[in-house]
Amino acid sequence: MVLESLYIIRLKSILHYKYFFKILVLIFLGYALIITNFYPYHSKYPKDINIFYVKVLKQEIKDNRLRLTVSGKEKLIATYYFKTEEEKNNYNIKLGDIIKINGTLEEPSNNTIPNLFNYKKYLYHNKIYYILNINEFSKVKNNNSIILAIKNKIISRIENIPKTSSYLKTFILGDKTSLEEKVSISYLTNGINHLFSISGMHINFLVMLLFAILNRISYNQNLKKLIIIIFLMCYMLILSNIASVLRCVIMFIVFSLNKMFNLKISKVNLMLFVLVICIFFNCFIIYDLGFCFSYLISFAIVINSDKIKKIKKKFKRSLYISWLCFLVSFPLLCYSCYQVNLISLLLNIIMIPFVSFIIFPLSLITFIFPILDNFLYFFIYIMENISLIFSKIEITKIIFAKPKLLVIIIYYIIIFSCFKNKKCLYFLFTLILIHKNIIYFNLGLHVICLDVNQGDSCLINLPFNKHILIDTGGISGSNYSIVLNKTIPYLKSIGVNKLDYLIITHGDYDHMGESLNLINNFKVEKIIFNNNEYNDLEKKLILALDDKNIEYNKNLKMLNIANNKLYFLNTKIYDNENDNSNVIYFSYDKYKFLFMGDALVDKEKDILEKYNLKNIDFLKVGHHGSNTSSSKSFINQINPKYSLISVGKNNKYNHPNRQVLDILKNSKIYRTDIDGSIEIKIGKKAIITTYPP
């Protein structure tokens, strides 16, 4: 007994050592960074394998696409497209079922536009190495897991509650995939997306509910905590170890054990220990944005818990908590969304209690009593429309360039220092001011040929925050928006809040099809058209320009922007849209650029006769490398050093043409289908960077 007491005393002395938990966190963070960066995970599957026996862990059906998360030797994302509506209706696989798949493995793609979401890294951080394309599948064995059987029952019950099933899945199972896309985007835009991830708020409510029930059964606090711990661990398993839930459950366990054994460890040190345990379970958790948001906000609230308790008025307390959430979320919002919405301060004050005390409790009650479906939907309808209305207010959205990891670390050092010393707020506001205007520090030229599939779109960033976009791209017959999903997020990620000019080379859809989406969702000062008659696409755009009072003109000879001159190599009016393309030439320092649009051989010949073009450094190749452009005589005359071809992967036109590639062989050829976006930065010298898929 004496020896045991000595061990307990020694353990307590170690735990109360001032720097013990800080050192422990540094050790585990270092360990996680080393393991995840220097010891890469390699798949256990050979790439040429075709037959897989796997367990279904998650499934989603959208339109005719089936998407499965399965587990065999390792986790895989499996995709299948139903051939008929009957096949889709007869689909009867449940979670936990063992299925046989005949399919092929494929490596996921990297982001081909810098700064944007990297799907390959995302999957890798979830320990998924391959995508499995399914040719055919069949059930081998029914589920035999109790946990997954419970989850199947929950899913089945939720799917029979039609109007609010998407929110019941969100709040009970942590699955946000069923939320309507525009509503989900509005939550993200408004900075209230954290309310729809299962985290501390939801777990705390469940704990309070369980305590209320258990208080009627037993007075033994330790027994009640033990029962709740077992319940939360089972719930965590049902939710498939969602990172933010893992943090909440571990936090409850650690704080409960601290009280049960009277260890008297401070709340701050307990939070540090929670981080250590989470990293111990999963090194990749440090890359999970949901976990980072959840943990940092909770950490900030714990650090400031004494201040929060001293605020007697509920509104002031809500305002202070909302300010904490906003402040701590700020660097991660800049990193993930490239903007912050000041209105989130107000919306969090409204929405935190609205979701906490109305929507979430009602969701649990509706799950038990489905008759309340319409009643819950009424409140959801109010919440969604408030979010949609506020998301359309542009004046409160402030764009910030995507910060580097070092900048994020500096942000958090200053932010958490502000909690102890208010004078640090001056440093924080200074850093924010520099960050907001970081683009003014780019004194060189930056040109990027964006990967927009089978289309054209090039961005020219001139010194002192001047920006020109040549074409927008556009995929005819597709609902996918390049501008909304790629161009605008990229512009925001580098700190661009407006385009000075949009130059449309000509009226083909693959060059200007996304123009309407651009002007409706991003600030554009002026539009420049080519020199022939407006076609239907251009007329439709002009109606929108007139409505928005955006200036536009055509038949320009030269554009002078911040003492940089862009020349439009006009020759004559042709009888086809391609030859009437705006062909643009400009030089910066000693480097010459030529953008050919879709100009054909006839216009190339006329350009050679009218203009003296030699030794072009960067040629944006005409018409995606088609053999109707880039004649041998033209290429020999301009003698490009680098040739950039914007072309879609496996396109139906077989661009670029083999003959054209032979003509361009004396230059270094870059292609967006192989190299992704092609970025050129010119300072003291030219640096070319590519972003292959």
Image (spheres, grey):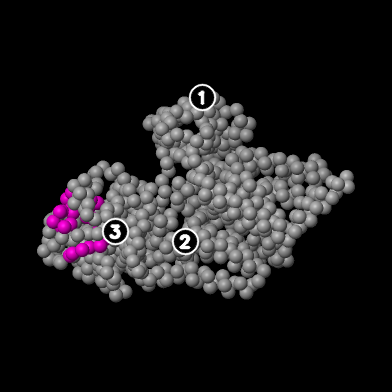
Q: Position of residue 153 (x, y in %)?
A: 59, 33
Percent x, y of residue 620: 25, 58
Of pointers 1 and 3, the one earlier in the residue sequence:
1
Residue on which disc 1 sits: 140
Residue topped by disc 3: 471
- Left or right of 267? Residue 462 is left
Q: Is residue 630 magenta?
A: yes
First in sequence, mark 3 or 2: give its number: 2
Q: Residue at x 76, y 57 (%)?
A: 16
Instruction: Mark 1 and mark 3 in contact? Answer it, CB < 8 Å.
Output: no
What is the crowding at mark 2: few (fewer than 14 residues within 10 Å), some, or many (at least 20)? many
| Residues drawn in magenta | 613-636
Q: Residue furthest top?
A: 140
Instruction: Say whether disc 2 or disc 1 marks the residue closer to the N-terminus.
Output: 1
Q: Can I make out residue 319 in this image?
A: no
In this rendering, would 185 be left or right of 419? left
What label does residue 402 carry, if any? 2
Tally the marks. 3
* Residue lying at 49% horizontally and 71% vertically, measured from the top left: 434
Identity, as a three-letter code, of the amino acid under mark 3: Asp
Which-is-in-front pick, marks 3 and 2? 2
Q: Position of residue 111 (x, y in %)?
A: 41, 51
Q: Amino acid at mark 2?
A: Lys
The kind of residue on which mark 1 rests is: Val
